[in-house]
Image: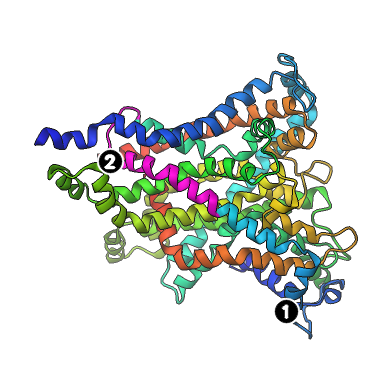
Amino acid sequence: MIFILLPFVEMFYASLRPLDHLFRSPYQFYSDDLSFWAYREMWKTVPMLPRYIFNSFFLASVTSIITLLFVIPAAYSYARFKFPFKNSSLYILLAINMFSGAVLLIPLYKVLRTFGLLNTYQAMIVPGVAFLIPTAIWLLKSYFEKIPIDLEEAAFVDGASRVQILRHIIAPLSTPGLVVVGIYAFIGSYAQQFLFAITFNQKKEYMPIPSGLYEFIGYTTVKWNEMMAASLVGIAPVLIIFLFLQKYIVAGLTSGAVKN
Amino acid sequence: MNKKLKSYTTQTYIAYALIAPAALYIILIVAWPLLETIRLSFTNSSLAGEDYVGLENYQKMFSSKKFNGIVTRTFVWMFFSVSLKLIIGLIGAVLLNANLKGRSIFRVLVMPPWVVPIAIGMLGWLWLYNGYFGIIAGVGMRTGILDGPFGFLAYKQSAFISTIIADVWVGTPMVTVFFLAAMQGVPRDLYEAAYCDGASRWDRFFKITLPQITPVIITMSLLSAIWTFNSFEIIWILTEGGPRGSTTTLIIDTYKQALGNYKFGRGAARAVVVMILLMLFAGFYLALLARINKKISHE
């Protein structure tokens, strides 16, 4: 427990202390003038900070929306239809999950370069979506499977079209599942931004916060208190979303991987 | 009527049409680049252009002592990291599963390292590991264990250990959560029966809990091995593979060759080795999963 929380506590503590207290060796456990000064000052040290935060949100939102667009029909199909290669293709999806971005970076870099997409938002969105699709399909599939098929079949026999079924039965019943998968995609893409950002993007105006934070590491001194403050600001959104929805997310993830 | 109903789930063309966009996307962004990596590994591709060079990249790579050292190091690093994650994860799950006060709060509190972007969490660790001003060096100096400032990431051995600890920090929560989920799935009556028979706490753990969750333990060790093997950001941020290559794992080396030096060909050859190793892991994992599923469906 201490092991898990210490870094966060210390990050918060450091963010409250003035820089000259931090730069004392050996470590001082006590500071008498704690303040939120660093939380104000950090915007001046790295003036682009709001932009980085915006970029992070923008990238994560776009990535998760695109992921959902691809995943919803596929997951529905896996949950409802019987067709050849169904199981083997599901296992292939699982296997794809195991290839980290790092292995595929070389060809992706070349492709993005050929299409002139390096240093754009797309450079971080396109590969991001690909790595979220497999897990998202598995997650959403298990949600769709929980919707009783009888409902749909009854409607189908009564002459409802597939589109009508989708609109009146599936859509309302699967909203909670869609929200959870959407949030999973959001947190996932927020987390994976760093790798794609340092590899495919060198332009400051498109940088997401995880890589933007490294600007606090100046040439002579590192403004640790401000960097910690900004880190916590960068962490806060994901953490808040997660705390509110952790029950659903954990249940979804573990049921997908443990029981199946 | 029945025929119509049957067609509802067996119209394969609709099924395929629904999957097609996702499948095409994955083929384009994942499968094709995989093949391209293999092709590039036989060339001397760089920013300047490329020529076919046959097996040269592989010959150079396997004959270099450095590369063999990197492979060994990767596995040592992985071994320690995965074992620690599993042990701590198991202990954590047992504690969280026990009837303790406030356990629901603790269950939430173990998770932050898992959700927080690794790149940001590592900034915290950079500060903790700071040799002059960090808290770990500080405690060491005050208790007299260290006789002066000590940069944990500046020396070969301590950097190696420090990156493992940070990796364990990131990876343990997920392992814990999965173990916990598995423990909660163990049927209650098993414990009640054992309790009536007078089995001790230890007996109940080793004779009921452990055997019941073994499938999950095995799956998690494989999955965690794969993730650990793939771990890039942690080492990259803390040490960039240094000092003097002491924390350079296969993934780091691949990245450095390809995107640090823009030697795409050499990087690709390393990526192919990574791929083959990952496929072995993945094969194990899928075979195992298929077996477990079979067992479950038999029961």
- Say whether disc 1 or disc 2 marks the residue closer to the N-terminus: 1
Disc 1 designates what residue?
Answer: A36
**In the image, residue A74 lies in the stretch drawn in magenta:** yes
Q: Which residues are magenta?
A: A61-85
Q: Are marks 1 and 2 on the same chain?
A: yes
Give the image location of residue B15, x and y in percent. 31, 34
In the image, B101: left or right of A172? right
From this view, report whether residue B290 is shown above or below residue A138. above
Instruction: Name the residue rendered at 72%, 14% in the picture.
Output: B52
Q: Chain of mark 2?
A: A
Q: Chain of mark 1?
A: A
Q: Nearer the viewer, residue A168 or A187?
A: A168
Instruction: Name the residue rendered at 77%, 32% in the picture.
Output: B262
Q: Nearer the viewer, residue A95 or A106?
A: A106
From this view, report whether residue B93 is shown above or below residue B32. below
- The amino acid on which the numbered mark 2 sits, given as a three-letter code, is Arg
Q: Quadrant of residue A11?
A: bottom right
Disc 2 designates what residue?
Answer: A80
Crowding at label 1, few (<14), some or many (≥20) Cα neighbours within 10 Å? some
Q: Main secondary structure of the magenta part?
A: helix
Instruction: Name the residue rendered at 58%, 24% in the picture.
Output: B35
Disc 1/disc 2 C-alpha distance (Å)? 54 Å
